[in-house]
Image (cartoon, rainbow, N blue to C red):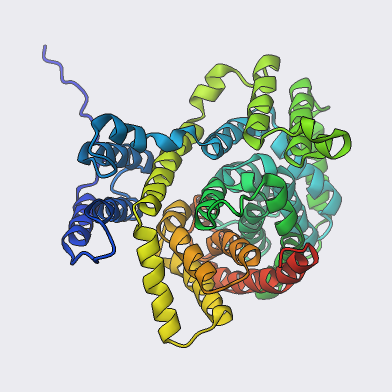
């Protein structure tokens, strides 16, 4: 008898890998500006090649990040000393922001394991579900409530809220299989999705790239602006709530569902809650940890009892995870199996490292001065220049399938340029931060949540792109007008 061993399937996709290598080499062999060192130019080539590989999906982003770390260390691009070179390549893994997002992803697993996320969703539907518009608001509120502790916006919108949305649509026999999405399913799917970018903008811990944005803002301002969890939440709260209130109405106007009155939805949600039974012990613990995290992230104990009770946001996340492990709501096996958290830790660390090295090696400074000169030559003042930067940053996301890759590639340089033009620092960086989530509305590949909901078939490609563009304009307008006024009231400018 002869036996054959299974064929190993590599993660490597040759064509996009070759394109990425070609892009990196092209950058390396282009005429080098006098203002940029040899090390800086090589770092730029490695960085752009990595971004091209991420965009082309040559390998999973975590694997590409390992490759980038190896390249940075082996080429000695940051130092001629091999020990210093590997230390630099691994430097970002000591960043508290990186661990904050990874640990928060682990914590969010408790929402799924205990069923608390689904219970919250059905609870809001039971209250607001007598009309289709009310179901829309129920889905949006469910997103809002769980957003602070679910940094995987894909898990939040795709794994928790989307099955609830599908269950409700199916209860009205509205689905792509029956060609009846227009009854109610299309509307609910669009609301399900467009809640996601708005809530992602409202909390540092609502989507994985937000801490990267915080890091880049600190670098661009020389650590003059270091956004805390509370500062971000407070700044984004009012524009976010207004956007969340208007979004179901805008989509209702664009694609009105044929079924407008839905008493059965409320009954369905109540039946689901009845089947779930009373709140279980693990759910109560999860709710308590949820509340503890919000209190500590918002610095409520320090507000009442003094600064000695101030706890770092990452420390708070570790406390929350510890409680869940001690009580058995999560086991260490659950944590080990939370691949998204460990994957995020790796790629986040690698991209932050490369962005930091580009800044240290003077590449960002050179690029920002070049852009500043172009804008100055065009005769733009800071208002027009800052507006152009925000618009270009936001709508260039049509060319990206990863918010992380997009933010890493463009955010740092755009921040430096806007600030050098004389834009008021705090409003400008907050507007850029908001844009990094608003851009998720645009396409069916804009972020991890979009293919999950788009592939369920309720919305055509044309409809998705149309609503995406309209919502980007609506959200951007809200953040400019409401956000600008709110930040003025807060004394940010």
Determine the residue positioned at 39% across, 62% down.
Answer: 365
Q: In this view, which residue lies farthest toward the bottom?
A: 379
Quarter in which the N terminus is drawn: top left
Tell me if 4 is positioned left or right of 423 in this view.
left
400 versus 164 height, above or below: below
242 versus 407 height, above or below: below
Residue 214 at what x, y percent from top left?
Answer: 56, 50
Tell me if 196 is positioned left or right of 39 in this view.
right
Residue 463 at what x, y percent from top left?
Answer: 54, 70
Determine the residue positioned at 47% across, 32% down.
Answer: 342
Q: Can residue 461 be seen?
A: no
**Total marks drawn?**
0
Residue 405 at what x, y percent from top left?
Answer: 41, 54
Q: Can residue 254 be seen?
A: yes
The quarter of the picture where residue 187 lies is bottom right
Residue 335 at what x, y percent from top left?
Answer: 54, 24
Q: In this view, which residue lies farthest toward the left?
A: 2
Q: In this view, which residue lies farthest toward the right?
A: 304
The quarter of the picture where residue 28 lies is bottom left
Which residue occupies the foreground of this view, 83 or 277?
83
Which residue occupies the foreground of this view, 229 or 395?
229
Quarter in which the C terminus is drawn: bottom right
Determine the residue positioned at 33% across, 38% down.
Answer: 63
Which residue occupies the foreground of this view, 19 or 79?
79
Tell me if 291 is positioned left or right of 182 in this view.
right
The quarter of the picture where residue 486 lies is bottom right
């Amino acid at each position: 008898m002869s036996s054959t061993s299974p064929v190993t399937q590599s993660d490597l996709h040759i064509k996009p890998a070759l394109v990425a290598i070609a892009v990196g080499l092209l950058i390396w062999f282009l005429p080098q500006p006098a203002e940029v060192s040899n090390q800086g130019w090589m770092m730029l080539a490695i960085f752009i090649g990595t971004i091209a590989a991420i965009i082309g999906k040559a390998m999973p982003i975590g694997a590409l990040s390992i490759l980038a770390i190896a390249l940075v260390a082996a080429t000695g691009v940051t130092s001629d000393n091999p020990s210093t070179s590997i230390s630099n390549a691994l430097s970002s893994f000591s960043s508290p922001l990186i661990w904050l997002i990874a640990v928060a992803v682990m914590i969010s697993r408790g929402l799924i394991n205990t069923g608390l996320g689904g219970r919250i969703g059905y609870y809001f539907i039971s209250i607001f579900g007598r009309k289709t518009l009310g179901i829309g608001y129920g889905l949006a509120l469910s997103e809002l409530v769980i957003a602070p502790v679910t940094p995987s916006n894909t898990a939040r919108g795709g794994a928790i809220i989307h099955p609830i949305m599908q269950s409700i649509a199916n209860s009205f026999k509205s689905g792509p299989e029956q060609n009846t999405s227009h009854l109610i399913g299309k509307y609910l799917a669009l609301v399900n999705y467009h809640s996601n970018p708005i809530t992602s903008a409202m909390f540092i811990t609502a989507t994985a790239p937000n801490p990267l944005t915080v890091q880049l803002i600190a670098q661009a301002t020389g650590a003059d602006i270091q956004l805390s969890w509370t500062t971000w939440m407070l700044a984004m709260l009012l524009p976010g709530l207004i956007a969340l209130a208007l979004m179901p109405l805008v989509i209702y106007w664009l694609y009105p569902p044929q079924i407008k009155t839905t008493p059965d939805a409320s009954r369905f949600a109540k039946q689901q809650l009845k089947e779930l039974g009373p709140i279980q012990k693990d759910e109560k613990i999860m709710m308590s940890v949820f509340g503890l995290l919000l209190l500590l992230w918002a610095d409520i104990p320090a507000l009442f009892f003094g600064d000695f009770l101030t706890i770092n946001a990452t420390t708070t996340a570790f406390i929350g995870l510890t409680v869940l492990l001690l009580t058995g709501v999560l086991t260490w096996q659950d944590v080990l199996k939370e691949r998204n958290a460990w994957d995020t830790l790796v790629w986040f660390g690698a991209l932050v490292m490369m962005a930091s090295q580009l800044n240290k090696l003077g590449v960002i400074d050179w690029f920002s001065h070049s852009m500043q000169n172009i804008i100055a030559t065009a005769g733009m003042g800071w208002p027009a220049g800052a507006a152009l930067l925000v618009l270009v940053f936001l709508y260039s996301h049509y060319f990206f399938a990863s918010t992380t890759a997009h933010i890493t590639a463009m955010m740092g340089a755009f921040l430096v340029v806007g600030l050098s033009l004389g834009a008021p620092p705090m409003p400008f960086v907050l507007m850029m931060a908001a844009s990094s989530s608003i851009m998720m509305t645009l396409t069916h590949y804009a972020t991890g949540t979009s293919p999950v909901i788009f592939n369920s078939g309720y919305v055509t490609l044309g409809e998705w792109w149309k609503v995406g563009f309209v919502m980007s304009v609506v959200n951007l307008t809200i953040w400019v007008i409401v956000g600008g006024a709110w930040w003025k009231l807060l004394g940010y400018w």
